[in-house]
Image (cartoon, rainbow, N blue to C red):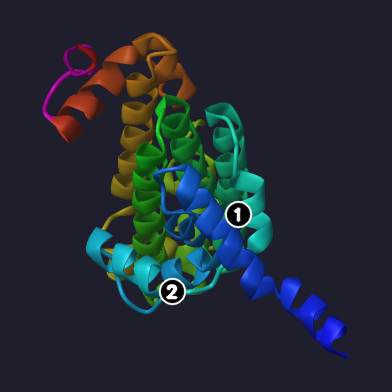
C-alpha cells in the first residue's frame, strides 16, 4: 500500500508541475509559470471578462493565478527561439478561434492574429513574446467589449461584418444592403442611429485602417494599395487618405 501511495505521489500532476517549474527556473531566468499561464491556460477567461483590461490588470491576474499545465512546461523547457515562435503562433491560432466562437467578428479576430504573427517574427526574447501576448490580449478584450457589449442589432452587426470582409473590394452602402439583403434606407438609418457613423463613413474608416496597415508592411506600392482597396484611381484614394490622416499616402509612407 505504501508503495502505491508513493507512486501516486510521484505521478501527482501538481507535484510534476512544481518540479518542472523549479527545474526550469533553476536553468533559465524566465518564470515559466507566468509564461504558460499567459499563453495557454487562463487567457480565454482573462480576455472575455466583464472588465476592460489594462496591462497592469493583466499582469496581476497572471501572477495571482495558480493553474499550470505540466505538458506545456515540459514542452517549453529547452526550446530554441524558433520553436518558441512556432509554439506561440499555435497559441495565437487557438486564441483567434476562441474569439470567433465567443462572438467576435471573424475578420477582426483574424486581423489581430495576423498582426501578432507579424510582431512575433520580430521578437528575439521571452520578454518580447510576453509583451506581444499582453498587447494582443488587451486588443482582443477591448474588441470584445466594443462588439459584444455594444448592444448593436443583428442587422447592424451583419453590416459591420460584411464591410470588414469587403475592405479589399469596391464597397458602398448599396452593396452592403444588397449583401445582407435588407432595404438600403432602413439599414442606413439604423446603422447611423446605433453606431454614430454613416455607412459611407464606416466603410472609409475600415479601408483607411487597412491602407495604413498595408503601407506599414511596405510590400505594395501606393498605386497597388489603392487598387487593392477597390478605389477607381489613385487620386480618389489619396484624397480620402489625406482627409482621414491629415497627410498624403506618400508622406505617410516616408
**Relative horizontal placement of residue 167, taking residue 64 as reference (left or right):** right
Please give the name of the residue rendered at 54% of the width and 44% of the height, measured from the top-left corner.
165
Q: Is residue 227 above or below residue 137?
A: above
Q: Residues within 10 Å of mark 1 (few under 14, many from 20)?
A: many
Where's the N terminus, which quadrant?
Answer: bottom right
**Relative horizontal placement of residue 129, taking residue 77 as reference (left or right):** left
237 in magenta = no
Q: CA distance from mark 2 to mark 1?
A: 16 Å
Where's the C terminus, which quadrant?
Answer: top left
Point out residue 98 in the picture as x, y percentages from the top left corner.
59, 62
Point out residue 115 in the picture as x, y percentages from the top left corner.
44, 37
Please tell me in which quadrant of the rendered image residue 90 appears. Answer: top right
Please tell me in which quadrant of the rendered image residue 8 appears. Answer: bottom right
Outermost residue, left direction?
A: 246
* Label 1: element kind: helix
Q: Is residue 213 above or below residue 63?
A: above
* Label 2: element kind: loop
Tell which of 184 and 160 is nearer to you.
160
Residue annotated with mark 2: 65
Point out residue 10 in the picture as x, y percentages from the top left corner.
74, 72
**Relative horizontal placement of residue 254, taking residue 44 as reference (left or right):** left
Earlier along the polypeptide chain: callout 2 or callout 1? 2
Which of the two marks, 2 or 1, is nearer to us in this view?
A: 1
Q: Residues within 10 Å of mark 2 (few under 14, many from 20)?
A: some
Tell which of 137 and 149 is nearer to you.
137
Tell which of 207 and 121 is nearer to you.
121
Numbered label attached to residue 101: none
Numbered label attached to residue 73: 1
Please give the name of the residue rendered at 27% of the width and 57% of the height, measured from the top-left corner.
197
Q: Which portion, as a residue range, is magenta?
A: 246-252
Amino acid at each position: 500500500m505504501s508503495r502505491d501511495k508513493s507512486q501516486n505521489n510521484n505521478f501527482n500532476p501538481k507535484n510534476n508541475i512544481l518540479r518542472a517549474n523549479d527545474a526550469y527556473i533553476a536553468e533559465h531566468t524566465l518564470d515559466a509559470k507566468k509564461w504558460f499561464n499567459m499563453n495557454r491556460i487562463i487567457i480565454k477567461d482573462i480576455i472575455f471578462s466583464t472588465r476592460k483590461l489594462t496591462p497592469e490588470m493583466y499582469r496581476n491576474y497572471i501572477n495571482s493565478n495558480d493553474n499550470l499545465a505540466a505538458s506545456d512546461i515540459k514542452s517549453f523547457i529547452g526550446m530554441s527561439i524558433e520553436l518558441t515562435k512556432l509554439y506561440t503562433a499555435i497559441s495565437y491560432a487557438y486564441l483567434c478561434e476562441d474569439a470567433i466562437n465567443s462572438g467576435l467578428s471573424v475578420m477582426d479576430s483574424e486581423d489581430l492574429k495576423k498582426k501578432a504573427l507579424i510582431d512575433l517574427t520580430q521578437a528575439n526574447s521571452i520578454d518580447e513574446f510576453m509583451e506581444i501576448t499582453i498587447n494582443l490580449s488587451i486588443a482582443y478584450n477591448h474588441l470584445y467589449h466594443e462588439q459584444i457589449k455594444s448592444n448593436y442589432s443583428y442587422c447592424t452587426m451583419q453590416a459591420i461584418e460584411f464591410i470588414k470582409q469587403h475592405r479589399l473590394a469596391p464597397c458602398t452602402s448599396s452593396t452592403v444592403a444588397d449583401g445582407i439583403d435588407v432595404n438600403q434606407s432602413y439599414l442606413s438609418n439604423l446603422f447611423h442611429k446605433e453606431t454614430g457613423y454613416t455607412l459611407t463613413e464606416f466603410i472609409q474608416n475600415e479601408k483607411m485602417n487597412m491602407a495604413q496597415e498595408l503601407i506599414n508592411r511596405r510590400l505594395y506600392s501606393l498605386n497597388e494599395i489603392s487598387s487593392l482597396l477597390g478605389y477607381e484611381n489613385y487620386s480618389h484614394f489619396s484624397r480620402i487618405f489625406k482627409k482621414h490622416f491629415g497627410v498624403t499616402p506618400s508622406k505617410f509612407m516616408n
